[in-house]
Image (cartoon, rainbow, N blue to C red):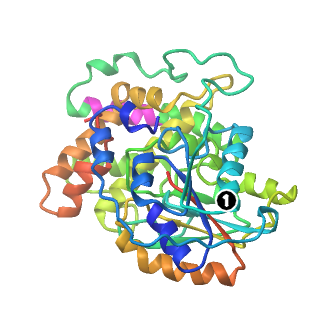
Amino acid sequence: MGALAYYLEEEGIPTTQISLIREHTEFIRPPRALWVPFELGHPLGAPENPMLQRRVLLAALGLLEAPAGPVLADFPDEVPESPPGTDQEPAVWACPVSFAPHLKEETDREKLRSAFRREVAELRPWYDLSFERSGRTTMGNFAPESASKLLDSYAFSEALERAGQNLPIAVVLRLAAHDLKAFYFEAAIARPGSTPPGSAEFNRWFWTETAAGRVLKAVQKRCMNEEDKALRMTGAMLLVPLGQA
Amino acid sequence: MARLDRMPEPMRSHLANLPCPSFENRPWIQGEALSQRRVSIISTAGLHRRGDRPFEGATGDYRVIPGDIMAKDLVMTHISTNFDRTGFQQDWNVVFPLDRLRELAGEGMIGSVAAYHYSFMGAADPAAMEPAARNLAGLLKGDGVDAALLVPV
């Protein structure tokens, strides 16, 4: 990020930036930067909190009026504990969609596959509701069923369901994995009255309680045994977050 | 939280050990008051229009995002799995604050919002992004932009 600011400023464009990793910005010393104490993925603070976003934005833009630099300022707030106007978030978020209870005993491959299919089918109406309500989905490349079929077929069978994607398979698998997680998240927050989980709660649920999380780990395992370098890299780095393997 | 000293391993070491470029000189362009500036968002979140080419890897290229884009038409294909996406899934402004920027322009706090915004995929090596970034400066000037707001993810 700091390097981009440097190149643009050198070409004559005034820049200001948000910084998430202060140590990187201290080292690169771009012209103007506002360090924020928020988690990775939340540079403007928090979703559905326009007042906080506005203050972050004004603080970053305000640096454009600094008389000299480089400037590295700190945003004073921590992220609020819970969205304004709501009660305190419960300590452990529970998914409002309850899956068939015998999932945990389903250890062999065919049982995992059928549990995965059931999850996708059970979440679909909630995903549809979320889409109808917000008019938006962040699934970028796949419908829910085509993402799940592709990942299932790569993990567990020889015949790969490519679904007409004209990209390298390593890229297709990564896009499908991210779309699958988006599907689970959007479905899980759709029930009226449910409070969206924080990222840690959602990750804990997705990676430890769903068949989808186990299928993605099976995809990862197969990738890491491939000869193709891009697939091995995808398996090692791009499917399962650090610390979840 | 994005504080290295509070981050669990192995993420802490992963981020602490990312190579950062070092630069000799300190470019500094002075400009108008904020209320006169035309602002463009430059994101490194791997964002693009739905239907545009997904980011395939760390090649340093960028995508053009038209200024009249709506939230439902913006998707994210960043390659990393080590940052939270659920914030963006709830509200695009947490990553791409275009609604907030439009409000500031409406109130006269900034001069105007640019006709185009841009997104790189931030896991790319800065050296790989340099040619595209220098080229982008020309496009920004053509749009009358005198404030680039760089937003990481």
Left or right: residue A74 compared with residue A206 = right
Residue A144 visible (yes or no): yes
Quadrant hosting residue B101 = bottom right
Left or right: residue B106 compared with residue A111 = right
| Label total for image | 1
Identify which residue, B127 or B27, lies in the foreground. B27
Identify which residue, A103 or A91, lies in the foreground. A91
Expressed as whole percent of the image width and height from the top left, the position of residue B5 reads: 37, 33
Which residue is at a point 24% across and 50% down the rendered structure image?
A235
Residue A136 visible (yes or no): no
Expressed as whole percent of the image width and height from the top left, the position of residue A213 reads: 34, 35
Identify which residue, A30 or A112, lies in the foreground. A30
Quadrant hosting residue A112 = top left
- The verdict on residue A118 being magenta is yes
Q: What residue would you read off at disc 1?
A: A66
Left or right: residue A208 compared with residue B108 = left
Expressed as whole percent of the image width and height from the top left, the position of residue A89 reads: 59, 18
Disc 1 crowd rating (10 Å Cα; few below 14, some 14-19, many 20+) is few
Which residue is at a point 82% across and 63% down the rendered structure image?
B35
Which residue is at a point 43% across and 65% down the rendered structure image?
B55
* Chain identifier of the residue bearing label 1 in the image: A
Picture layout, residue B108 above or below residue A10? above
Q: Which residues are magenta?
A: A111-120
Chief secondary structure of the magenta portion: helix
- The verdict on residue A80 being magenta is no
Q: Tell me the quadrant of the picture where the C terminus of chain A can be found.
A: top left
Picture layout, residue A149 above or below residue B36? above
Picture layout, residue B69 above or below residue A186? below
Residue positioned most to the right: B107
Kind of residue sitting beneath label 1: Ala
Picture layout, residue A50 above or below residue A61? above
Residue positioned most to the front: A68
